Amino acid sequence: MVPTAVASSSTSVSQAAGDSKRAPRKSKMDAIAALSLRSRSPSFGIEDGRPQTVQRIVPPPTPNNAPITVTSALDLNTVKTSSPRELNTISRTRPFGLSDCPTFYPTEEQFKDPMAFIRSIGDQGRSSGICKIVPPEGWKMPFVTDTESFRFKTRLQRLNSIEASSRAKINFLEALYRYHKQQGNPRVTVPTINHKPLDLWLLRKEVNKLGGFEVVNKGKKWVDIGRLLGYGGIPGLSTQLRNSYIRVILPFEHFSDGIRKSPSLSKELEQGSSTQLNGSGPSTYGESHIKTNGSASPRMGSPTSITSSPLSEPPDDLEINGVTILNGSPKVHKSSANGASGSNRHEEKRVANGSASGHVIDLVSSPVAKTTSRKEHNTDICEICQRDNRPTEMLLCDGCDSGFHMFCLVPPLSAIPKGQWFCHTCLFGTGGDFGFDEGEEHRLSSFQARDLAFRKMWFQAHPPPQTEPFDPNDPTINMLGNTRVSETDVENEFWRLVQSPYETVEIEYGADVHSTTHGSAMPTLETHPLDPYSKDPWNLNNIPILSESLLRYIKSEISGMTVPWTYVGMIFSTFCWHNEDHYTYSINYMHWGETKTWYGIPGDDAGKFEAAIRKEAPDLFETQPDLLFQLVTLMNPARLTSAGVRVFGCNQRAGEFVVTFPKAYHAGFNHGFNFNEAVNFALPDWLPYGLDCVRRYQEHKKHPVFSHDELLITITQQSNTIQTALWIVDSLNEMVNRELKGRDAARARGVKEEADNASPRDEQFQCSFCKAYCYLSRVVCTCPKGDSSKAVCLEHINYLCECSVSQAVIRTRFTDPELHNIQSTIATRAAMPENWRNKLGKLLMESATPQLRTMRALVAEADRINYPLKELPVLKRCVAKANEWVDSANTFITRKQSRKRSKRARWPPSGDDRAERPEKSLEDLYALLKEVERLGFESPEIGQLRVLGSQVEECKRNAAELLEKIPNDDDRSSFIQECETLLAHGSSLNVYVKELVDVENIVLQEQLLKEMEGIEHANFTLDEVRQFLMRARALNLPGDNKHLKVLEAKLQAGNDWDDRAARVLSQPVKTIEDLNQFFDLETSIPVDPGVLNRLSAARTKALEYERQAKAWLNPEPGATLPKVSEALRFAQKAEHEFKIPAIEDLQRTADFALDLEERCEQVLKGRYQHVEDGPVFDAIEKWQKYAQEHLSKFALPNFDKLNKQLESHAAWMTKLPWYNIEHGRPQGSEVLTDVLEYTKPEDDGPPDDEFFTCICFLPVRPPPPGQTSDAVMCDHCFARFHGRCAANGGSCPFCDPNHWNGNIHKERSWHFYYLPLIMEAAPDISKHYSEGYRDLQVITHHVERLSAVIKHFLAFASQAGNHRSEYVPQIRHYMRKLYKLQFAIGSNPENSFGLDLAGLHRMLSVMPAPVRVRKRRRPKFVFGQDVDKDWRDGTRCICRGQTHYLYGFPVITCSSCSRRYHAACVCYKMESASQVFMCPLCCLRKCKPFPTADMRVKFTKDQQRDVFIDVKTCIETFSRELIRVRLDAPKTSTIFIDLVQFTPGQPDVGPPKQPVSGTQTPGAGPSRGGPPHTLPTRPILPQVRSPSSSAPPLPPWAKRNDAPSPTTPRETAPASPSVSSHGPLAGGTSSLPGGSDQTDPLIPFKRKRKHSVIDGPQDNVHVFEAAPGMKRPTSPSAQRSPPIQRSTIGSPLNLMLNEPAQALAQNGKVPPAVQSPRQVTSPRQSPVTGRIDIPAMASLARSPVASTSLDRKAQPIAAPSSGVRKVRLVIRDPPPQ
């Protein structure tokens, strides 16, 4: 028995029947590895043909056997994210006596450049192979991986199978395994899905049950398969099932049935075993680069791999029965003749980047294609029968391209298999394929839990010896339960398990997790652009592409090399001995976790290491020559050191870097759960190592990751610096020489050559023999039978094909001249620094004092080279010193022109010329000459400076001779002339000579004395006086000089003037008087011209302001008047600088004018609020007068517009019919009074009194007994008239048309038709402010309403079928109104309604009145609660909301009307809430007693307190009038109810009574002679607002602050609550309890409900839309119009007008006049309560109001649209019968 500790899940071990024993794991076959598949290795438990049992040591169970709780996200507080820096300074003894590798602590400055720092530590790092770098304090790379979504696959590692000596036994077991598999009896490892073993047999069974793989895959039934297998809710389940089937089951189905024992097959198998893979193993890579198996599998997820990561599934193309299935089995790859291992990592990268050539990976659709290809080349030979016949039945192995007859196979095949097919050699080759199987998929938290559980289990079972005292603060010691484990204990235990043949520990390692798929753990510019660490040079995403990393020139990303990989380790997980791909550098960073131990071997000892490990396990290298490329072998460091190999150790902790150097072998293991990230880079010193690695790859026939030659060429193309040339010159020379040597050798053998123009420049080809890239050239065969896609390098032409060499062709990417050109360019560029050094050495050797210009040229050349030269800084300092000396010398050498003074100039413009004297003296010149001797260079300036020195000496001697002379007065002029000549010569020498200064003073004194002659009477400026004094003092003139005294006096006077001017100019506001005082002074006082100019400019500006202001205040005739705004701006501008009386007057006048303009603008826009005494137009007239007298000096456009409006208003007023020319104003008050009196809507119905027959509105009653009446009667219509009324006209106004056709003269002899036209023609100012317009508006509105009513009546009654005598009272009523108005009313000027009514009256008055029988009808009651609004608590109670303390009291709801009442108000006990409650109002209407109290109904108009209404009797008798009863005071609980309106009932016969209400019912007729309960309501005229009593100002509108704001338009001012108030039911302000909202006059009850307060009637709301052009009269005068109310005409005509349906029922005919869109069609209307306001309808129906529909099914009122006014009419329906 072999005890085995398993750190992975139980799915890592397969069990056979009974007591099974586990065999070593088997990786994917070589051929499948060649096709870039990861291995999900099937595993069998068979050894020596007997079942093998595996004894497993599992972690101790948790309490109650409960599973370990794992969170979805990793808590980073549970891992080590940093380590103490002092740990690296503590000296510790390592196992095996190893030395620690160097550890570096860069400063913040050193840490800024990773490449420079690594280059600086290169010598120490290469000596140990690896080194550790601890970042500076404060640098902390953030960990950005989402630990909740991060998933990774693990590799299963059996520790005692990794060690070289232990694995010698494995090859025998694998051979036995292959044999049993070839027999078709394998037992595979059960894959896991969601930590649950997958039943492969059941999977295959369910797939076949549904029709097989092809049907399931095409139908996408994998979800159904998973459901059948018992899986559910697992992400990617269908993909895992499908890929598991493809990986494990589908290949077995294709090949297992044909494998059986056969001598020929056994021989073939032996041949296949003897011809093992020639080292075509996997590529080498760093700690994180552990691969699935030991064969040619590439790095997972590299850019050229078909799969992208360990989590990625196999490639997705599979062809079955001629159908290509996406996401199926891998593509068919055509390998080279030798390469059973097929593709490698580099091939995968090239495929991913689309740059691989067809030769590397040949995608063939089926074996038929390969059969045809082999037939064309005549190379098809069956490997079994060794015959080439029957090529159409020849199969080619997808692993080795060997051919097999289908009938030679055992069992024979009858058809070409679909998909991939592998021969027995590829399937059952022995050795060369050991590797790590895939484990489970994990998240970080689950992997952490597994690691911790295993560590505790293992070390509690194997506690390490405790030899050292325990330090609880030692961070290198972990407490696992009660067991203390140090880093040394873990390291010793690891190597013990690796070498133990009896204890098999299998752990998991999350290696090679691709950042391209899962994202880097470091921030990147793509994922975290704002994180500063995304740009940090130590970020592993940035290191490969830094400026000094040569990998940045690789054209495509290489996953794992230029793109980081991440690794998740657990206890004992290991990475085996290896060096990096192409011997590059690598850098590994630990983000967090437990320690990782590294072992490094210097690159110089790589040969010793390989010899030692070959000696350790020679049988492994015999079967696997490329074993070290496979990263699956460890060897104890102790045995390596004993073999003379230097081995160094390193413990990497959280936040630390480990760098491996070129060619250095390294290995290591993890102490626990940790997370690392690694990437490769290449410094320039790597190039020789890279070339050595390529040669080694060729020897082992291993695929390189990239082309070394292509990298060199790319560097030459993309970098033109000398630094780069120096890096690559040697490698480039080797490459070119090697290439040209190979070409020459091939040409010598007769190989042709041609340019490779057909292939793309980026296409890659590899040698089919050595697998090296053929970048510069490749050799192909051009014979017809040759494979044109096959190529070899120049070294392996013999392995191209069997054809003659003459058939071979060299296809070159670059010609020889191009290669020479590249070589020479780089060589020349690389030689530039050395050539420069040679020039510098030659210059220094030729002369001790080299020429300065030559040194400058060398410096310029070095700057152009742009390469660090160590001699350059010294040379630059020398040249800089020399340049400084030359600059100093030039200050002496550069000659200035002689300054010749003009004798005419009285004084120099700048005063003294001594400021121009040279600063350096002759001593400075000699010091400069001495300095150049020390510097040691040669230049022309040195000689020039010496010549200058001699000239200065001579000039100095001449000046001394002149100073010694004492000339007399006669020789004075000649002496001065000699001095001036010497000064002219000395001024050009640029050297200060004291003697020349003395000579100059003599000359200047002489000139000054001449200039000062006559100074007493000269006019000088203040500056000139000051200059004279300054020169005199500088030349030391004596103080008693008369000219000097005059100058001092002038200076004092000038300074006084300057001070006074400064004070005036400093004042912010100046006056003209202050400025004038400076222009009346004596001219002898010196002044400052600049100050004088400023004073003059200010004075001129002030005078100009004054002149302009006076010109505007007193304009000349015909002058252009300024605008008010212009004058104000002018005045404000002037006031900022000057104080001028004319400007102040202009400002005040302009303010008045601006105020007037604003008022005129408000008037024109209709926004003026008049608050002064008197009418608006009187105030405007005062404005006009004031403006004409005082403001005519300004242009007043608004005032002019207002004047035009006033003229239009005056002209319009004369057009009014009641305009009085004598008085000059309209006199329409009498007309307005009559119109308001006789056009009331409530007075449209005739009086219900038979004595109302006169043309007046008083009844003609019989005289009292004993008196004589003066009444007269018409002979035609028998109408009786008062005597006084009959005297007017002498005839019956009802019958005589002369009263209506104009024959009888009337005071108002105009026609109403013209009044609306006059109103429309009114100007805007009249509409806004004229009382006459408002009167006309009211008259027109009221008369139009009356006209519409009469017109509608005439249209109906004039029809023959409607001629009835009962309409005569209505006709007479209308005629009375027209008679009182006196002016004609009609639809056009030729028409008069009075004349039409008179004709209709003559016809109908002689007709007999018919007797009509009415159907009886119950009276209706409207109680106070019916018109109330809901109170704030939702009740409409008996208290009517007047008792506020009842708020919050219990309420009860009526079961009949659903109204809510306070229980206390209705005497209801809440304990009886279960009983049905009916409110008092419903009980009254249903004639039922109220159970809890008595009820008394009080009519609101009755004054007597003990009089009540008998509701029950009124209802039962269908009473027309209220029946009153007198009752005593109540003795029990009594409820009092207010009656506000009564609608009379209708007995079987007799006319109906009018409704009775506490106030005038809308539409009720006048009260003259009416029923006693009908109350007349007169319109309330608007209250005229009294003007304010402010005193009239000047101008008239002064005291603007007292006036109201003109912003509110007059039309929109809210009306007073008293205006148009006609009771609570007619609009205005409601006085009912519960609210005070204004209601629409057309809506008697504003409350909306489906059923009315009366038992049953329904409210139907109809909408009238008024056109936007029709304005609602809202001005005060317009508000005098009473609201439109419903008519209550109590005659048969009214019934016909308002109830056409009932009229139809009575007469059998609908009047045609009523058949209009506005008719009411409901047959259920009440004759009395269901009336429609016919006058209001007529008024709204006339233009410009749109036509109105009174459809019963009209929708509820919607919100008014823009410009549309909504009006509602309420129609009441009677309750359903």
Image (cartoon, rainbow, N blue to C red):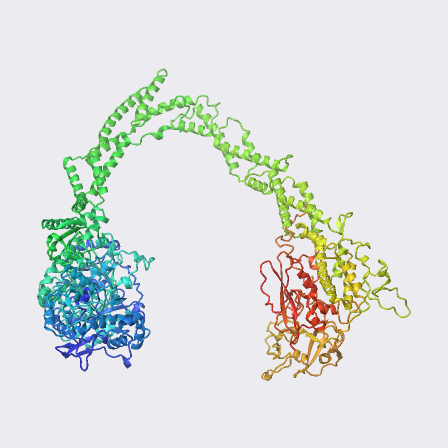
| Residue in view at x 72 percent, y 70 percent | 1695
Find residue 1076 and report its horizontal and vertical position in percent.
56, 32
Q: Nearer the viewer, residue 1606 or 1318?
A: 1318
Find residue 1181 and report its horizontal and vertical position in percent.
70, 46
Find residue 1254 and report its horizontal and vertical position in percent.
82, 64
Q: Nearer the viewer, residue 1264 or 586?
A: 1264
Q: Is residue 1644 left or right of residue 1008?
A: right
Q: Nearer the viewer, residue 583 or 1256?
A: 1256
**Is residue 1716 positioned above or below 694 on the image?**
below
Q: Nearer the viewer, residue 797 or 1034?
A: 797
Please identify the residue farthest to the front as the structure is shown. 390
The image quarter containing residue 1520 is bottom right
Please identify the residue farthest to the right as the structure is shown. 1266
- Counting labels gives 0
The image quarter containing residue 954 is top left
**Is residue 1251 positioned above or below 1465 on the image?**
above
The image quarter containing residue 1728 is bottom right
Please identify the residue farthest to the top as the structure is shown. 970
Instruction: Tell me the quarter of the image containing the C terminus.
Output: bottom right
Whether residue 1577 is visible, yes or no, is no
Q: Is residue 1607 left or right of residue 340?
A: right
Whether residue 528 is visible, yes or no, is yes
Find residue 550 and report its horizontal and vertical position in percent.
21, 53
**Is residue 1012 positioned above or below 37 on the image?**
above
Instruction: Tell me the quarter of the image containing the N terminus.
Output: bottom left
